[in-house]
Amino acid sequence: MNWDWDAVRDFMPLFLDGLAVTLQALALGSLISFTLGLVWALLMRTPTRWVRWPVGIVTEFVRDTPLLVQLFFLFYVLPEWGLTLSAMSTGVVAIGLHYSTYTMQVYRAGIEAVPAGQWEAATALNLPRARTWRAVILPQAVRRVVPALGNYVIAMLKDTPMLMAITVLEMLGRARLFSQQHFQFTEPLTVIGVAFVVISSLASLLLRTLERRLVR
């Protein structure tokens, strides 16, 4: 097998476009999953069962159905109900919503790991409940869950190729397009594989650095 550097050079513009799409989907999807996951976790701790039960049913349903099915549903079914999103917006929402059901469990574990004495101290100081969460509980819980949240960032990165199913040309989609046009598969797919490894490694390094700083 001969390695064709000309093919790599020709593929680079497409690769860079796909990389930008992948990173954008990853960043926005992570933001949605982290934010919505925290909302789910807080709602699951409310004393009102009429709040907990619907949240539990919805999150369990989302977690137990494949991401690909959710992508197709949001992209093809919602327009029939009058709600149309762009392919990129649909992909970001689907990834964020899907993984929010996992980050919810991470947050819940972090909250439950906060010592009971912290709650008692906040009560003794007569802190309002909102301030107790904001200033006492959540900062401690988030420190504990950073490594687990980081694992889901990498998982979301590896799921971004699914967006190709709804016409979003991220890195793998661009590689497939190039391969079909030029009948060269080795070079673009190798570049994509290396890119995923590099991005995952950088994300892991960044998260370890963040974890060490939070532990201080």
Image (tube, rainbow, N blue to C red):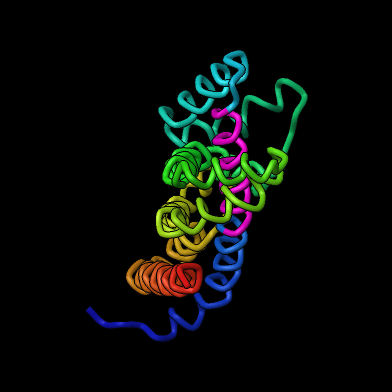
Residue 77 percent across, percent down from the top left: 63, 25
> Hey, which residue is sitting farthest right in the picture?
82
On screen, residue 151 versus residue 131, left or right, reads left
Residue situated in front as seen by the camera: 162 or 92: 92
Q: Main secondary structure of the magenta part?
A: helix
Residue situated in front as seen by the camera: 195 or 214: 214
In the rendered image of this protein, does residue 144 appear above or below residue 216? above
On screen, residue 106 versus residue 35, left or right, reads left
The magenta segment: 27-45
Residue situated in front as seen by the camera: 126 or 14: 126
The structure residue drawn at horizontal position 46% and vertical position 37%, both measured from the top left corner, is 68
Residue 213 percent across, percent down from the top left: 49, 73
Q: Decide if residue 106 is in sight here.
A: yes
In the rendered image of this protein, does residue 99 appear above or below residue 148? above
The structure residue drawn at horizontal position 44% and vertical position 73%, both measured from the top left corner, is 212
Q: Decide if residue 192 is in sight here.
A: no
Reply yes or no: does residue 54 show up in magenta.
Answer: no
